[in-house]
Amino acid sequence: MYGQTVRRGGAFNRLVEPHWADPLDTSFSRQHGGRWNAPGSYGVLYLNASDRMARIQVEHKLARHPYEIEDLDPAAQHDLVDVDVQDTDALDLISDDGLRAVGLPGSYPLDAGGHPVAHEHCHPVGQAAYDQPLPAIACRSAVTGARRTDEELAVFDRDAGIVTQTGRRAFADWYFSAPRRRPASRP
């Protein structure tokens, strides 16, 4: 078995562009890649474990721009798609031991020198989990501003059937006033 696993399931969410007709489509990540998948390999559905994590994602995306979130048209900003994930075993990239078991530093998302771990170092980990085959990766967020306890769930495209959309909220309805939710976690 590759690495160690943790159980994950329950409420998660996904940031999507307002014009996306199918918010659970993984074709963009299949084509362009992401943290856990190389471009042209397989698709990954990247999910946030809380509304707080989704807010941090938005702030990270806008961090290098000369304007604030309040300066933007809310109708053109990310919708938040609420999903339910069936209980599943996911590769544990949350705990220090889980990270070390796959060759990533316990300091992840930073390396021992305090620099972000590059996607190129994460792609082989994702490929090995995909090949095992595990349905998902539970990981610490690598987004600037996230805490070690902020989680993401990366669900492989062949297992996307474990994810069911339960709602969709416009930016103005979730970013400024949404209650914070926590996913159901199991040991």
Image (tube, grey):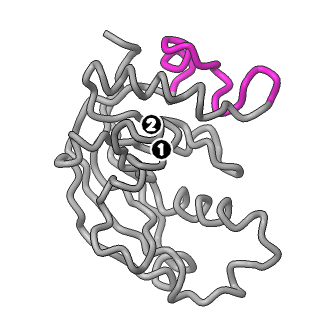
**Residue depicted at 40% across the width and 41% down the height:** 40
Q: Amino acid at mark 2?
A: Asn
Q: Which residue is mark 2?
A: 37
- Tell me the residue at 54%/79% (across/down): 77
- Give how far across and how far down residue 137 sits, in percent: 39, 33
**Residue 136 sits above or below residue 68 on the image:** above
Q: Residues within 10 Å of mark 2 (few under 14, many from 20)?
A: many
Image: magenta residue range: 95-114
38 or 139: which is nearer to us?
38
What residue is rendered at 23% in x and 52% in y?
A: 163
Q: Amino acid at mark 1?
A: Gly
Pointer 1 with pointer 2, Cβ within 8 A:
yes
Q: Seen in the image, is 99 located left or right of residue 86?
A: right
Q: Can you give x and y, in whole percent of width and height, for residue 108 in the image?
A: 64, 28
Q: Which element type, helix, strand or loop, lies under badge 1?
A: loop
Total numbered circles = 2
Mark 1 = which residue? Answer: 33
Q: Secondary structure at mark 2?
A: loop
Residue, x 51% and y 85% (percent of image)? 172
Label 1: how many residues lie within 10 Å, few (<14), some (14-19) or many (20+)?
Answer: many
Q: Is residue 101 magenta?
A: yes
Is residue 60 shown above or below 81?
A: above
Cα separation, mark 1 vs mark 2, equals: 5 Å
Q: Is residue 48 above or below residue 142?
A: below
Asked if the magenta segment contains residue 182, the reply would be: no
